[in-house]
Structures are given as C-alpha cells and as structure tokens.
Image (spheres, helix red, strand yellow):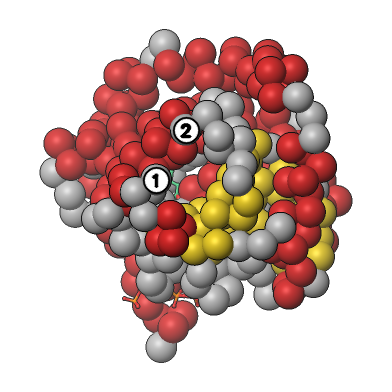
Amino acid sequence: MNYINAGDRSGCLSFLSGITNLSLIQCDLSCFLAQQSLPPVNSLSLEFLTDVCIALEKLEMDKSCRGLVVTSSQPKVFSAGLDILDMYGKSPEHCAEFWKAVQEMWLKFYGSNMITIAAVNGSSPAGGCLLSMTCDYRIMADNPRYSIGLNETKLGIVAPFWFKDTMVNTVGHRATEMALQLGLLYSPAEALKIGLVDQLVHEDQVLTTATETMTKWLAIPDHARQLTKSMMRKPTIDKLAANREADVNNFVKFITKDSIQKSLGMYLEMLKRRKA
Ligand code: CO8
C-alpha cells in the first residue's frame, strides 16, 4: 500500500480544512491513516477531540473508506491520554463539555463500521490506551521505554465504567482488575502477554505492519465483519449510550472535588519536576 497525502485529493477531503492537529493520509482507495499531530504529546483536549470526531464522522459517511490506521506523528508518544488541563481548574460547564467530547470519541471509535488499527508507535497511557483499545487490532513498537495502560488511579482518579468495560473486553476480568486498581502501565512485552496489544514489531515496522494487517482485514466482506463487530460491542456501547447524562454528571461532580483537583495539581507538578 502506498501513502498518498490527503491534500492531493482536494475536494474529497475538504472537510479537513481547519483541522490542523490530525493529518489524514490516504493509503489506498479504501483506507486512511489518521496521524495525531498535536505537540508535544497528543493529549486529547476538548478541541482535539472535537476535530477527531468530525473527521471520523465524515470518514464513516464516505462508504468508500473501509479502514483507518490510527497513529502519531509525535516522537515517542502515541497519546498522553486526556488533556489534564481540561480537567484541572476548569468550570463545571467546561468539564461537562469536555466529558461529552470524550464520550463521543469513544462511541464513534468503538462503534465504527470501519476496520480500525492502532499503530502504537510510542507511549499510550490512560485515554491513549483507551483510544487504542477502541480499535480492532493493536500493533505496538517493541521499545521497552514505551508503556501502555490505564493508570488513572496513579493520578488519584477513577476510570469510568466504560473504560473498564473496554479493557475487560480486551484482556478479561482478572487482568483488568489488577490493571485498574494498581494503575499499571505495561511495557510492550507485558502488554503483549496479557493481550492488551496484539503484536509487537520493531519501531520502524509499525506502520508497514499496520498496512499489511489492514490488507488482510479488508479481504473480509464488510457486511459480515461489521455485523460481527457490532454483535461483540453493542452491549458495551448501549450501556454508555443509555447513561450518558448520568455519566457526565458523575464526572463533573467527581473531578471538581477539591481533593481530586489537589491530586491532579500534584500530578501535573510531578510531570514538570520529572522533566526538570
Ligand atoms: N495532559 C496535559 N498535559 C500533559 C499530559 C496530559 N495528559 N501529558 C503530558 N503533558 C505535558 C507535560 O506536563 C509537559 O508539559 P510542559 O512542557 O509544560 O512541562 C509536556 O506535556 C511534555 O511532557 P513530558 O515532558 O512528560 O513528555 P515525555 O515525552 O517525556 O513523556 C508521556 C510523555 C509518557 C506521555 C508523559 O508526558 C506522561 O506520562 N504524561 C502523563 C500521562 C497521563 O498520566 N495521562 C493521564 C491523563 S487522564 C486520562 O487520560 C483519563 C482520565 C479519566 C478520567 C476519569 C475521571 C472520573
């Protein structure tokens, strides 16, 4: 598969105008590569999530687009997860908007009719791990300096039920119980062992392997694969879809608590100190 810059198809992808932090590159006639390009660490901010949702919705409506490879153009990081600055020191209204966008991103990716493959070419904590788990297949760079997992408890926060459900569906109940309580970040080898990622390859081979894998998945008739995917994921999706408002309210109540804000502040400080 050859990559063609999406800009070369002006007109077809005019919806991308104004979306600057997500590059869409066409792999072949039926598949795209979505490269997160939000420096420094692709943190999922309200604006970025909104852009990603718009792009995904448009691709979903384009029936010729059957597959999407999700990756990062930032060195060493697939995604740092949710943007902590959208949850720290913000009004309840802002937090509610932010959380609705996080839900929307999850619903769109987890329920996508497209074949989605995560090319995890760097660290992928928390919301970054969630994003990769919404995909149908995960290929990770075999570099022990990278890690992946739902580390929310380390920030003093609690992964909501649909993060938990997504992980249970990926690695099973027991592994999720351990992972979530301890806020475990796994090395690529450990992640492969518990099934959090499906394949490890050399750093240089992540994208090539993703496109080769896509070719295999594209050989399956869409209608059969889509119905099968939906059968597997619908109960989990329906659970959030039926409880979106309550989930937003829970999030806002939780995240705006003084004690939780204090934990987030300390975590941000720790990130800065570690850098210094
Ligand atoms: N949000 C906002 N800013 C961030 C984030 C983030 N998630 N991650 C990193 N940054 C910032 C850093 O503070 C730093 O800022 P500055 O340049 O101003 O000092 C800058 O990005 C670069 O960070 P690093 O120097 O740490 O970059 P490295 O390349 O060394 O490391 C990592 C990259 C591994 C991604 C590292 O930054 C890291 O571990 N980040 C934290 C990741 C994390 O813990 N994310 C959790 C977010 S919470 C979430 O996704 C789910 C929440 C569910 C909520 C449930 C509540 C009910």
Ligand number 1: quarter of image: bottom left
Q: Which residue is identified by label 1? A: 12
Tell me which residue sits at (61%, 42%) in the image: 30
Determine whether 202 is above or below 243 in the image. below
- Indicate the quadrant where residue 93 lies: top left
Amino acid carrying label 2: it is Asp
Viewer-closest of 29 and 76: 29
- Indicate the quadrant where residue 92 lies: top left
Contact between labelled residues 2 and 1, with CB atoms less than 8 Å apart: yes
Residue 35 image point, x, y percent: 50, 60
Side of 176 where 114 appears, left or right:
left
For residue 122, say whether it is visible.
yes
Tell me which residue sits at (60%, 13%) in the image: 235
Residue 173 image point, x, y percent: 74, 29
Q: State whether label 2 is within 8 Å of ligand 1.
A: no
Residue 269 image point, x, y percent: 34, 71
